[in-house]
Amino acid sequence: MKTHLIVLSFLFSINLSFSQKTITGTVTDNYGEALPDVSVFVKGTKKSTKTTINGKYSISVPKNSRILIFSYIGMKTVEKEITSDTINVKMVPSEYYLEEIVTTDI
């Protein structure tokens, strides 16, 4: 019985590994600077990750996934179709992004 459970769990883990693929890449701004802490989501799932201080990310996605979503405060959200194992993204400022904030004392 114990042997059967081990074999079944091994086969299940093999099946999971074949149903996933890993996507990697780098996220930069429109000046080519790396963006840390960009949220990367697999559309239609709860899977997500964040970019490192160098703007790099790696995420394991189900084979049937089609879109990655990149989100960062002050930048336009980007949706990219999964067409390869490497997807690099350039993010641009949102039209609602404030260039500077001025405070006054009343």
Image: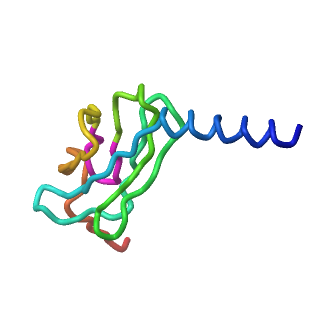
Furthest residue toward right = 1
Q: Position of residue 32 (x, y in %)?
A: 12, 62
Image point 65% across, 35% down: which residue? 12
Name the magenta segment's main secondary structure: loop
Q: Position of residue 49 (x, y in %)?
A: 45, 52
Rendering quarter of residue 54 = bottom left
Residue drawn 71% across the image and 39% down it: 9
Q: Nearer the viewer, residue 98 or 25?
A: 25
Q: Give x and y (percent) for residue 63.
A: 42, 30
Q: Is residue 54 above or below residue 21?
A: below
Magenta-tinted stretch: 70-78
- The image position of residue 80, as x and y in percent, is 26, 36
Q: Residue at x 27, y 62 (%)?
A: 35
Q: Is residue 83 left or right of residue 64?
A: left
Image check: 2 left or right of 66? right
Q: Nearer the viewer, residue 102 or 64?
A: 64
Q: Is residue 95 left or right of residue 45?
A: left
- Residue 71 sits inside the magenta stretch: yes
Q: Give the residue drawn at x 66%, y 41%.
A: 10
Quadrant of the drawing holding the N terminus: top right
